[in-house]
Image: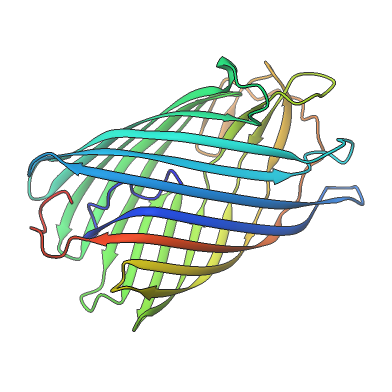
Amino acid sequence: MLISPFISHCQEYVDILKLGYSYSNKAKFKDIDESTTIKSYNASITFPIELNEKYALITGIDFSSNDLLLDPDYKESTTLYNTLLKVGLATNHSKKWNSTIVLLPKITSDYTNISGDDFYFGLYAMAKLKKNKYFKYRFGFYASTEAFGIFATPIIGAYYLSPNNRFEIDASLPIAANVNYKFGKSAVGFDYFGIGRSYNISQETAIPIYVDQRPIEISSYFQYEILEENILLRAKVGYSNNTYEVYEQGDSLDFRISAISFGDNRTQLNPVILGSIFFKLEAIYRIHFKEKNKDSQI
């Protein structure tokens, strides 16, 4: 997924591969005695290439799918796909400052008939300030074109790792946050995820439509490490607001900053999908760089 750090300057590691599957049963439609099952898959590959002590090239690809019934009146469920490329540059400006800029072209739709309407473009930029060896600040922004218009959000966060390496806080608000505590090879944690995207829909409907997805997911998890902390296995349980709003193509808003929409006079075409409990399994392949110079990029 997009918002985990593409390369972990604040930490001495980088997550090369992430896999996940989540399941939510009987997410109800508001004011209707109907519900839908939501099944989601995601995979993320990030491959940094160290050019020298100052620069690192960032490459990778993210893929996700969400399968659900958007409206009880639809004959079958819809699968929403997202494929996103990551191409960027990480730079060490000094012992205290470093930055990351990543270009994010993507295809988001039901992949029924891929056309130019399925292509969108995003940009992620982040600067990090090292306060001390345990704490760093983050300042940045994320922006993208979407089916409904322009989305943008500032990012303010921090990273903290306790001196005994047990307690960790990794926050990039309002998009994502992760707090965990380790004991041996196991850990317990809490995380938050809250960034959306839109999908162009080509399947047969009365009028051309798109989906505006705005999830807010809060979960707790149990984690177990194997192979010298290189593979992390997580089991999660949490709550998601399951926002999948259907609109006619061309029915747009002026722009959206974080959770605030401007000029939004759109007419939602499907019933509101209420929040529900979800379960998720994750696997992460992580490479550590503890023996490298701690002021280097990777």
The image quarter containing residue 54 is: top left
The residue lying toward the viewer, choosing from 210 and 18, is 18
- Tell me if 97 is positioned left or right of 11 in this view: left
Does residue 94 lie above or below 161 as drawn?
above
Does residue 235 lie above or below 35 as drawn?
below
- Tell me if 297 is positioned left or right of 177 in this view: left
Residue 180, given in percent of the width and then of the height, sits at 40, 71
Does residue 173 lie above or below 75 as drawn?
below
Residue 163, given in percent of the width and then of the height, sits at 20, 75
The residue located at (11%, 64%) in the rendering is: 291
- Tell me if 232 is positioned left or right of 159 in this view: right
The residue lying toward the viewer, choosing from 11 and 142, is 11
The residue lying toward the viewer, choosing from 209 and 17, is 17
Q: Can residue 174 be seen here? A: no
Residue 61, given in percent of the width and then of the height, sits at 41, 39
Residue 85, given in percent of the width and then of the height, sits at 40, 33
The residue located at (38%, 74%) in the rendering is: 225
